[in-house]
Amino acid sequence: MVRKEYVVEEITKIMGNLDNIRNIAIIAHVHHGKTSLTDSLLAKAGLIPRSSAGDLLYTNYEAVEKDRRMTVKSAYISLAFDYQSKDYLVNLIDTPGHVDFGGDVTRAMRAIDGVVLVVDPVEGVMPQTETVLRQAMKEKAKPILFVNKVDRLLNELRLTPEQTQQRLLDLIVNINKLISEYAPEEFAEKWKVGVESGSVAFGSATNRWAVSVDTLKAKNISFKQIFEYTAAGDEAKLEQIAPIEDAILPMIAKHLPSPKEAQQYRIPQVWKGDVNTDDGKAMVGTDAKAKANIVIFKIMNDPHSGEVAIGRIFSGVVKKGMEFYLSGHQGLQRLQQVALYMGPEKIVVDEIPAGNIAALIGLRDPAVGDTMSENIIEPFEQIVHFSKPVVTKAIEPKDPKDTTKLIEALRKMQKEDPTMQVVINQDTGEHLISGMGELHLEIKETKLKDDFGIPIVTSEPIVLYTETIEGKAGPIIGKSPNKHNRFFIEVGVVPETFQRAFDEGEIREGKPKGQNAIEAMIKAGMDRPTAKGVVQVTNKNVFVDATHGVQGLNDVMELLIEGFNNAMKDGPLAREKVTGVMVSIVDATIHEDPVHRGPAQIIPAIRNAIYAGMLTTGVMLLEPKQNFTINIPQDTMSGVISFLQSKRGQITSISQEREQVTILAKMPVSEVIKGFSNDLRGLTQGRAIWYTEFAGYEKLPKELQAKVVREIRTRKGQNPEPPTPEQFMD
């Protein structure tokens, strides 16, 4: 096996040749074969023995991944290979397929220009297949398709060669429908995959063989011969005549774009600065001679180097000792080292030019989504996660002496995975961790125990609800405790179109900056005068200054925004986060003496007014829901349907293929976090297989709200009965 240092030496020689670089990710639904495919590509590059490929799962290097044979975090590795007598460099990211770790997929999409979509033809297009493809399309990453596990069609479903071929063609049609739906308009047709174009390959990653139309021609073999070998179970022969890398690597080189090509259309998508500036032109042109501009898409905690930022270099060259501005930070920061990650191993190099991915060591408090630049530039667009944390657990150290250690471990884990949220409950002293689902939190608990060595105690899962309103109220008067300041506010609903634009990243969290931000809000359904008055956007909530000529308002605006943010993070009904509420200040009376208008006066005044306004119009809870795809034997269908309906599930479709039934249902998270798995397995004698996908928030039924509110308030140490508007209007 080739030493990795030698491999890196070869890689660094290719880095400057933009035409021959490919930044790609392997994406798929869980267990469709991403990491097995990655193994074969690593073997081709000389990083692992070929005999281990498909079973070693090299990029699943964390203990929890090895134990579960499942990718839970993205791993990146650089591979050099020869194609048509040219040296190519593939910067590859192996991404998770489980829905709970979809945040890692989202973040990886910022770094790459193309994806290899892997699909199991027996399961077909699954929920996460669609989700990861949608994420790729949003970041303008071009797809190619690898249909894995085709042997299952013959060996398990017992399909004929003709039926197999039809099944594969139908699968490609379904993938192309998704590409048409989600691809940028200018690429909706160009990016469709097809057998004839050579952008589709078929094979078995575990058995290390694959074919495309190009390899069939090159090796003078036919699909019929492939079917015959597969049906006969002669995998060794298939590997000999059609090794998987001979199909996949040329497909990557031929059909996925180089950075030079991709950055021309990707930069305007992910960066809203002026592309006609020097930095804008440099990034669009992937100019290694210009000033460096980088976006950080991943943070890793290294036992020797501390926090390591991994970033895509869009222009310039990155070297040890260079100084950078980091968005959200003051002043310049000096880079201590530059490195490449080869899966679990970090290898230091002298420099890495534009168009590549780099590990950046020595930065002070970097974060996912940060912009690194030699000049101060407009930051890159926020990385928007499709799913939201919906399940929470309280967590404490068994030994109180480990509290500080636990807090530091949680901080590091949250930096690595921003979809995990950590909150300290001031009332109980508990640490609350929120994640995408039970598995997400289970993995985090395992890491705390095994990687950080902290024995912990956790609560039962808790569901995260959100609070919102449907009507309008106001003007409501909010008085400061000293009665010297008064704020008149109105509350209403943020337009649905605005909320969708926020979810899709078109509208940013925080203070709107510049005319572009105002135009984005108008485009999202807000009238121009209101959009011009917006001073803060927080979690789909909007704070508007609708006053005219109020003396002293600007002096207290930062405190008003802080009070608004407090109210949105801790609503009046159940102390849950607020969403979809517009708060407008329409008038105010402010004391001229700064002594009488400090934080202790202004913040409660505006927060109480918001609470009173929301309670006046009526606050409701929204509950998180998940879409379930459930595969069961036909003879268990009626029992499973009754069970799902008893859990307030909505059956959206039922389909059958032979003896297998697929049920699609939308389920409240509160009904499935306790005992659901055991009950469903019991109903189907353990034969049920299911997958979930975040389905957003919907209104909690009115008949359940009072009970749920009392339970939440009691758990949080509040009076079980919710407050009245009058309690905030004194």
Image: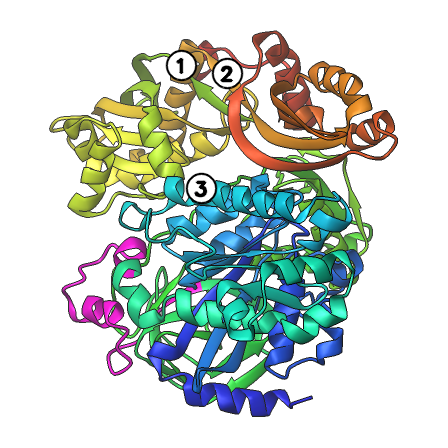
Other-residue count near label 3 (Cα within 10 Å), few / some / many at <14 / 14–19 / ≥20: some
Camera-nearest label, 3 or 1: 3
Residue bearing the label numbered 3 = 178
Disc 3 from disc 2: Cα separation: 35 Å
Disc 1 from disc 2: Cα separation: 8 Å
The answer to whether residue 706 is seen in the rendering is yes
Quadrant position of residue 323: bottom left
Name which of mark 3 and mark 1 comes first in the sequence.
3
x then y, percent, for residue 214: 48, 68
Quadrant position of residue 627: top right
**Residue at horizontal 39 percent and vertical 26 percent from the top:** 580
Quadrant (top left/top right/bottom left/bottom right) for the C terminus? top left
Q: Please report the bounds of the magenta region as a residue range.
A: 267-296
Q: For mark 3, give the secondary structure.
A: helix
x then y, percent, for residue 473: 33, 12
Q: How is the image coloured?
A: rainbow
Q: Cβ–Cβ below 8 Å for labels 1 and 2?
A: yes
Residue bearing the label numbered 1 = 470
Other-residue count near label 2 (Cα within 10 Å), few / some / many at <14 / 14–19 / ≥20: many
Q: Is residue 269 magenta?
A: yes
